[in-house]
Image (cartoon, grey):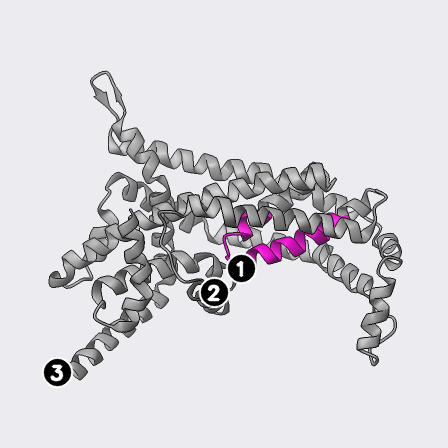
Amino acid sequence: MNKLSRYIIIGTVTAGILFLAWYFSDILTCILISAVLALIGKPAMGLLTSLRIGKLKISPAIASLITLIILGAIVTGLIMFIIPLIGRIVTEMSTINLDEINRKLASPLYMYNVKMHEMFPTMDKDITIETMLMDQVRSIFSFDLFTGAFSSVTSFLVHSFVSAFTIVFVTFFFLKDNNTFTEMVLLFVPEKYEMNTRRAIESVNSLLIRYFTGISVEILCIAVLNTIGLNLIGGVNFQMAVVLAFLSGVLNVIPYIGPLVAGIFGTLMGVISLYSTGTDIVFGTMVITLAAIFVATHLIDVFIFQPYIYSNSVKAHPLEIFLVILIAGNVGGIIGMLIAIPAYTVIRVFAREFFSQFRLVQKLTDRMEITEGED
């Protein structure tokens, strides 16, 4: 078989697999979520199965059940902590006199409005920075938006009950039988590629465990720092500070773009929150203070957290990551951006295992070789 025929067959098989993955995307998504949860719960699973009470040892089934309960408790705890805070903030924001805030902002923003109209002389004189900001806030906290969101969430919860049960059921067996996911993948792999696939899956498991552990620690650290900064330095009330800090921690998972969005949104909401409480503040000073808090936390993350947290994680060139995130965002929106890095990690590992003869693959995976050498 010549090379052209081989490449045609490989391309055809790949296209067929991608089509099946798209067609059964709901089922595949549940399986992948279960695999991720199993990876996250793997350290707890290992600890539980290694414990001994006298001559008794915890069985894999019991350890899997306990791990699932721990994961469920963490998710439930986050929901029970965040949702009431968000509800309280929405209630507070609905009572804010936006016209009064608009009036207060008019004076400190006057010179900026003058310069804006000088730059765009055809712009309507009634359009000002503060009116645009208030229009955006009104749209964010409009009753129709929350009614629609509630309807969407309700519909989602109703239709996702089977999916949730499937995820829990599959995760249990992924935890209980450590090689279940590997064996499922190997069913679709020719026998001569079995060893390569096993090595690739082992590498992926190791790298993703490090990645998700690092991400969890990073989110917690950023949320704590921003809560302290917003509340004690910025003067933002505790409830608002916690929500904005948690949001900034989650968005920080998206490199480059996430911290920028979190900083802009957090600064805007912090200023509006302070104005709503009647606090006498200087607009420019407060914007700089709140922005500086997000910038300082981001710098601490870049220079302190990330070098330690990701010291054993997969490394890639910053331009690679940036392009991957842009492509993932264009294809899958926010969800695509969140899963971009772990998905790219999986692709790089399998590419290195099966297509290492190509120069492009060698260039894209050379940093992975350096990382493993450091370990």
Classify mark 2: helix, strand or loop: helix
Q: Measure how far apart labels 3 and 1 are at the Cα level.
A: 45 Å
In the image, residue 261 sits, relative to residue 48, either above or below, namely below
Q: Measure how far apart labels 1 and 2 are at the Cα level.
A: 7 Å
* Disc 2 residue type (three-letter): Phe
What range of the chain is rendered magenta?
A: 247-272
Tag of residue 322: 2
Whether tag 1 and tag 2 are in contact, CB under 8 A, the answer is: yes
User: Which residue is painted at 22% across and 20% down in the image?
Assistant: 56
User: Which residue is painted at 36% across and 39% down in the image?
Assistant: 41
Q: Residues within 10 Å of mark 1 (few under 14, many from 20)?
A: some
* Location of residue 171 in the rendering, given as x and y in whole percent from the top left corner: 33, 44
Tag of residue 2: 3
Classify mark 1: helix, strand or loop: loop
User: Which residue is painted at 11% across and 63% down in the image?
Assistant: 192
Q: Measure how far apart labels 2 and 3 are at the Cα level.
A: 37 Å
Q: Tell me which label, 1 or 2, sits earlier in the chain.
A: 1
In the image, residue 143 sits, relative to residue 19, either above or below, namely above
* Location of residue 136 in the rendering, given as x and y in whole percent from the top left corner: 73, 61
The residue labelled by disc 1 is: 256
The answer to whether one can see residue 34 in this image is no
The answer to whether one can see residue 314 in this image is yes
Classify mark 3: helix, strand or loop: loop
* Disc 3 residue type (three-letter): Asn
Quadrant assignment, res 344: bottom left
In the image, residue 261 sits, relative to residue 205, either above or below, namely below
Q: Tell me which label, 3 or 1, sits earlier in the chain.
A: 3
Tag of residue 216: none
Side of 196 relative to 295 (left or right): left
